[in-house]
Image (cartoon, rainbow, N blue to C red):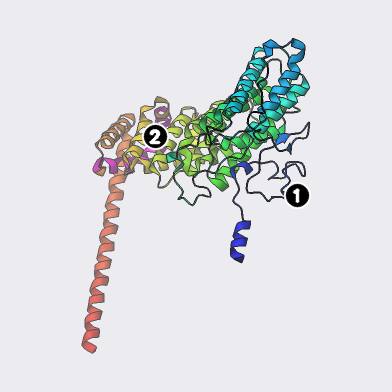
Amino acid sequence: MFKKIIKAGHRKPSKSDANDPYAYGYGPPGGRNSGSVSTPNVVVNHASRAGPATLGPNSGGPTAIPPMAPPSGTVDPLPLFRDVPVSERQSLFIRKLQICCFQFDFSDTLKSVREKEIKRQNLLELVDFIQSGSGKITETCQEEMIKMVSVNIFRCLPPASHENTGQETTDPEEEEPYLEPSWPHLQLVYELLLRYVVSSDTDTKVAKRYIDHWFVLKLLDLFDSEDPREREYLKTILHRIYGKFMVHRPFIRKAINNIFYRFIYETDRHSGIGELLEILGSIINGFALPMKEEHKLFLVRALIPLHKPKPIALYHQQLSYCITQFVEKDYKLADTVIRGLLKYWPVTNCQKEVLFLGELEEVLEATQSAEFQRCMVPLFRQIARCLNSFHFQVAERALFFWNNEHIVSLIAQNRGVILPIIFEALEKNIQSHWNQAVHGLTVNVRKMFLEMDAELFEECQRQYVENEGRAREVEEQRELTWKKLADFAAQSTGEDMVTV
């Protein structure tokens, strides 16, 4: 019994805890629900998952529990904006927001059907009102709107299929995504927030009081949602916030960094890495030159280590774009990037190797000769290993490098160093590789080197033959030694038997 109590005390962090300001000591004391006990440096949450919350005025944190669904028949439709005088529209706006704060159970499609439709119609009207720009909403209305948005979207994410279900962990690529049942309402709430952020009538000096650091962190928490529709809205909204609220830019970059660190070194699971990298791809594209040291550290400490996790295939396209953007912005970073790729090069995962080779080719296209020379020795040692891979896609993808004119020109300039490194791999492929396509491509590459520098090629061939001869001699000597040992052992055994 005692062991069960101890085990119950060790709660696995939920998705909603990731990058939570209160979990890392960023939030104000007592800013979470009443079930948490805070100390100067530690916040202990006694609930298994924190409940949804609303924002207090300028509080930077949650203050109230949102109203649940009202009794059936107690919610009446409100008039349309166009049916009331202009002077009454702001008060009607707030009344509509209050109705939209009610939460409904979407697991039962027959429950509260009328109330759900009333809320949906009110949300549609609110979106149209903001989008049309028919009237500049007051600061009070803005505050109430962000409260309503917070009540609806900041919620507990359901556990993934591998969490707390007793099921075996499955490959994230094979899992079916969980689709949010309340999406008919949730989509309209996200649309309202997006229209508010992008509206030319939105004054950032006022809006930043409500779209603050706490709000941004809670938005980032939601990127772990399994619903791809929700992540797409979050991506667009956060990107717009980054563009409009310049005061939040360093904070957003740091918060995304923290998500990456947690993903790489702790959880190895996160649904929204690809979307966050898409946002960063656009941000990196706008970096000014010369590049700040902060951005270079982000590349080394966050982006390059993102090659380590197993589910890289889910976000590799976006990651490769970000990495290439850095090299195109500052070609001197090519050596750092290539050495980083070599550090995290997969050993047994062939599909991951194919992804790495594709990314490596894109980086090499933006690499200048000086940076190439700094890393070409370890680089082509790895490429030589790929050329001899028994997985034909890996060997084939490595051989495709010689179809790229820029890479061939870099190789030609440094052929004296590169050819001796890969010559043995080329010869082994020609002699014994099982795949005909790989064999044909290897012959073409070999011919290219021969035409490039016949004298160097012959020297490499001579050294290869000598090395092979020495290797055969060593092998013969080893076999002879083992034979002598075997004969000696047999003789000793025979003598022992005679003695007995």
In the image, 426: left or right of 183?
left
In the image, 403: left or right of 492?
right
Magenta stretch: dominant SS? Answer: helix
The x and y percentages for residue 6 are 62, 61
Q: Going 73% across and 37% down the picture, which residue do you hit?
A: 64
In the image, 322: left or right of 238?
left
Residue sitting farthest toward the front: 73
The x and y percentages for residue 256 are 62, 36
Q: In the rendered image, is residue 288 in sight?
A: no
* For marks 1 and 2 on the same chain, the one whose residue lies earlier in the sequence: 1
Quadrant placement of the C terminus: bottom left
Quadrant placement of the N terminus: bottom right
Mark 2 neighbour density, 10 Å: few (under 14) some (14–19) many (20 or more): some
Gap between marks 1 and 2 measured at Cα: 64 Å
The x and y percentages for residue 409 are 41, 27
Rendered image quadrant of residue 19:
top right
The residues colored magenta run 408-431
Look at the image and say whether residue 285 sits in the magenta stretch. Answer: no
Q: Which residue is disc 1 drawn over?
A: 38
Mark number, residue 107: none
Q: Going 59% across and 27% down the picture, which residue do you hit?
A: 116
